[in-house]
Image (cartoon, rainbow, N blue to C red):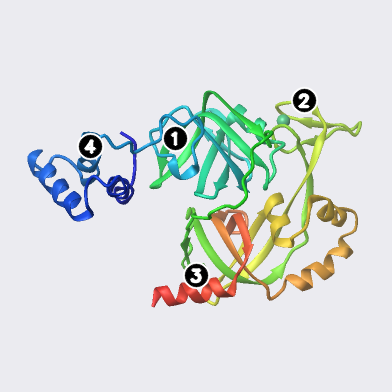
């Protein structure tokens, strides 16, 4: 059974014209009673839809819109625009080291997270935010009450395929807003809003262009990746800013993509600072006092015994959004 929210199942049944909303509610209670309460409302609604011959999911379509994708589906093909590309993360499981990278894909019906593991991560090296991505033969899991697309064994992606376009994206990802003073080590998916009170110079280093791991310069000037040997390196960087929201302050850690977002600069523009940090002074001054919204996770830096906020996304605070948020909280 696919994981379809109850409200959506009800909507689809009512839209078929075969039952009114109130008749449907009655029928759901009857069905639950018939089965001695051993079934959820969702389960009852599923059965009713089947009995009425209503197709809840579009299995006949070769390509699904993002809103038509539900946890439990297999062989899913979808097309969307890359709204966010997160940094590659390494993790260890037992004595194995793995890699994971995810991105948010969006179309006019919604957004969904797509996750790439280990060797699949390399397929993403050429993918940028704003690219159109066709994901083929993937399967859908549930994670944190949301859908998550994974590539199957035969799964593949096409970058900017001919004839595919996405004009607008309906943003639907919501994160939990926290006060900086309330953050704890290990918090994930937290959103903070803070004012920049201190800016540190970016640090530059080289990474392997296929796996994004640190590439070390050899005596002869070539670069070595622990996994790929001698490689053509790609420039990467990290930047720190201290954010304050009145409840406390925290050091935000921004890797390459997020540094580009914060500075509203391309990789080319940022790399200019590598050779001349004095050019960065004006940028620093401009950033002070600006408000940013960061989503990410909190980690204790053992060496300095302080919490740090690893940013997965960063965006300029929008005053109108913040006012709307205060109004809904009250
Ligand atoms: Zn490598």
The residue at which mark 4 appears reads as 52
Q: Where the C terminus falls, by quadrant?
A: bottom left
Does the residue at mark 2 contact the one at mark 1 (Cβ under 8 Å)? no
Left or right: residue 146 versus residue 129 is left
Q: Please name the residue that numbered disc 2 is placed on.
A: 229
Q: Earlier in the sequence, mark 2 or mark 1?
A: 1
Q: Spatial distance from mark 2 to mark 4, Cα to Cα?
A: 61 Å
- Residue 299 appears in which quarter of the rendering? bottom right
Placement of 305 over or under 71, stated as above or below: below
Mark earlier in primary sequence (4, 3): 4
Q: Distance between the residues labelled 2 and 1?
A: 35 Å
Badge 3: few (under 14), some or many (20 or more) residues near its Cα, within 10 Å?
few
Residue at numbered disc 3: 181
Observer-side mark, 2 or 4, equals: 4
Numbered mark located on residue 75 in the image = none
* Residue 57 visible, this angle: yes
Q: Residue at x 23, y 37 (%)?
A: 52
Query: Which residue sits at x=23%, y=43%?
Result: 45
Q: Residues within 10 Å of mark 4 (few under 14, many from 20)?
A: few
**Most foreground residue, 322 or 236:** 322
- Secondary structure state at the residue bearing disc 3: helix
Q: Residue 140 carries which label?
A: 1
Q: Which of marks 3 and 2 is nearer the N terminus?
A: 3
């Amino acid at each position: 059974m696919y994981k379809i929210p109850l409200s959506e199942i009800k909507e689809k049944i009512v839209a078929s014209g075969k039952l009114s909303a109130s008749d449907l509610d009655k029928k759901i209670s009857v069905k639950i009673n018939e089965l001695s309460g051993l079934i959820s409302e969702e389960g009852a609604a599923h059965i009713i839809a089947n009995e009425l011959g209503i197709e809840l999911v579009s299995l006949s379509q070769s390509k699904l819109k993002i809103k038509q994708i539900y946890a439990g589906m297999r062989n899913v093909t979808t097309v969307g625009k890359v709204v966010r590309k997160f940094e590659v993360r390494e993790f260890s499981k037992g004595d194995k080291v793995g890699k994971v990278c995810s991105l948010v894909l969006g179309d006019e019906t919604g957004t969904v997270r797509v996750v790439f593991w280990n060797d699949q991560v390399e397929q993403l090296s050429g993918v940028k935010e704003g690219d159109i991505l066709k994901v083929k033969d993937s399967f859908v899991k549930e994670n944190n009450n949301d859908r998550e697309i994974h590539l199957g064994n035969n799964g593949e992606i096409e970058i900017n395929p001919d004839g595919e376009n996405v004009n607008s994206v309906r943003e639907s990802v919501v994160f939990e807003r926290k006060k900086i003073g309330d953050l704890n080590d290990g918090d994930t998916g937290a959103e903070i809003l803070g004012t920049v009170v201190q800016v540190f110079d970016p640090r530059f280093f080289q990474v392997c262009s296929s796996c994004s791991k640190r590439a070390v310069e050899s005596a002869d000037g070539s670069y070595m990746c622990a996994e790929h040997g001698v490689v053509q390196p790609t420039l990467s960087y990290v930047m720190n800013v201290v954010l304050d929201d009145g409840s406390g302050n925290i050091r935000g850690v921004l890797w390459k993509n997020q540094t580009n977002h914060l500075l509203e600069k391309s990789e080319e523009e940022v790399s200019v600072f590598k050779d001349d940090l004095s050019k960065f002074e004006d940028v620093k001054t401009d950033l002070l006092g600006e408000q940013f919204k960061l989503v990410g996770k909190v980690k204790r830096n053992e060496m300095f015994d302080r919490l740090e906020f690893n940013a997965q996304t960063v965006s300029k605070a929008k005053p109108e959004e913040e006012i709307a948020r205060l109004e809904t909280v009250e």
